[in-house]
Amino acid sequence: MRRTWFLGAALGWIAIAGCGIALAEEEIVVNPDFAKAGADGHPAGWSIWTAEVEGARTTARCVSGGLQIDAPGRPFAVGGVRQDLRPIRGGTPYAVEVRCQVDNVPSPYRAVLVRLTWTRGGSALHPAGMYVRGPSADGKKLVFRDVLVAPKEADGARLSLEVKWPQGGRVCFERAGVRSTALPPPRKVKIGTVYLRPRNSTPEKNLDLFCAQIDTAGKLGLDIVCLPEAITLVGTKLTGPQTAEPIPGPSTNRLGAAAKKNRLWVVAGLYEREGPRVYNTAVLLDREGRLAGKYRKIHLPREEWEKGVTPGHEYPVFKTDFGTVAIQICYDWFFPELDTIFALKGAEVVFAPTWGTTFADKEGKIEGENIFRARARDNAIYLVPSVYDGSSMVIDPLGRVLVSNQGRDGVFWHEVDLNDREPLWWVGHWGSIGPRDRMPGTYGPLLEDPAGAPRPH
């Protein structure tokens, strides 16, 4: 199997969140607590910036306890302070920590931003810089905390504290620090997907075949492997409801034993029966073979709702020992809202047990492969379909196919670093920018029935 090693560290875009970062080196920010102010009330060592449009400008001034930024009567005002930091040593990790308090700010996540931009000779190496992770709550304060690695060519950096659309509230920055530090370890995960389509089979034989794939994944040393949709149905003469069983139940017991034997996580699709209802479900089994969670397919195609299959209604995410994951099933991939919800809830990897199809584009039409790639790119997530028609793949947050079965049966895998944050050209790292630039207050039409009759086809 091929591996691709990301160049994040060399490019200076690897960024790792850490708790209790050891700030052993000297502080390189001048006036980090805003205690020194000039005659104009502005903090010494910092430069003020605000909007070009006069009616969208904030005010910034030193107050007891820090730097206050507000804009009474200007809900969509923007502004903040910046400081150029020198010297910066290329290739060195730097710990950034910023603390602030907010008052009457409806959405601190979108309104309060901390950005670090690497520079050389005073010019930005990437126009967007990198958002510092946060904010997280520490009592009544908000904290931004991150470790960013300077590109080898960097000799400086620009720290920017930004307020965007405070909606009548105010922000008080209390401290902003940057110090060199040790590089935290990467968060590498070996992710696998399966391509296998049983024929002329039975549910029992299918379980044997897919447990053998789990054994193969174990021999490869994978952390997690994804099996396709409805693995006890495919290749049999049964219907989905006829294969339905309780979860946990006989099939999860078999799959769980294989997961425990191989010390890995397993995602697998099964039909589930709970009382009078039948669901199309995918399970997550942990390294001990225990049921760690399940997802019930929400978007049902005609073939399922006509049989009486009940749709799910929840979007769970699951904590594993390597990161946060979610699961979708087949027809779900036609609907962009699902992966957006998972990403907003913190999912880093979304697994997709799927019947089909992930075909490549043909006749100028966008087919499943590129839809999956776009979903990954739209939400800055790894997306891992395991299919019967098309290709089983591991796709990265920029939409690149890291591995594909390309017509072969078996287990296909790729090692990734979940701490890597690679930027888009010009835009920057979409996983930190996109959620902040969303406008959920305008999305009401998504919750309404379409106006008028459906469009003719």
Image: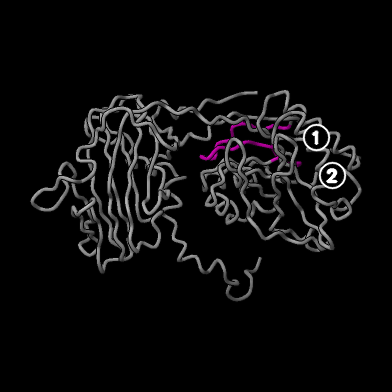
The three-letter code of the residue at mark 2 reads Thr
**Quarter of the rendering occupied by the C terminus:** bottom right
Displayed quadrant of residue 201: top right
Per the image, label 1 sits on a secondary structure element best described as helix
Q: How far apart are marks 1 and 2 (CA)?
A: 16 Å
Inspect this view and state whether residue 225 appears.
Answer: no
Q: In this view, does 42 lie to the left or right of 131?
A: left
Q: What residue is rendered at 18% in x and 54% in y? A: 61
Image vertical order of residue 16 relative to residue 342, above or below? above
Inspect this view and state whether residue 169 appears.
Answer: yes
Task: Give yes or no for residue 247 being in the magenta stretch.
Answer: no
Identify the image's colour scheme: rainbow, by chain, secondary structure or one colour: one colour
The part of the chain drawn in magenta is 386-407
For disc 1, the marked residue is: 257
Give the dominant element type of the magenta stretch: helix, strand or loop: loop
For disc 2, the marked residue is: 232
Q: In this view, does 323 lie to the left or right of 420?
A: right
Residue 257, given in percent of the width and then of the height, sits at 80, 34
Q: Is residue 137 left or right of residue 348?
A: left
User: Which one is earlier in the sequence, the residue at label 1 or at label 2?
Assistant: 2
Q: How crowded is mark 1: few (under 14 residues within 10 Å), some or many (20 or more)?
A: some
Residue 341, given in percent of the width and then of the height, sits at 56, 54
Give the residue furthest to the left: 39
For the image, the number of numbered tags is: 2
Image vertical order of residue 343 relative to residue 179, above or below? below
Image vertical order of residue 324 relative to residue 51, above or below? above
**Quarter of the rendering occupied by the N terminus:** top right
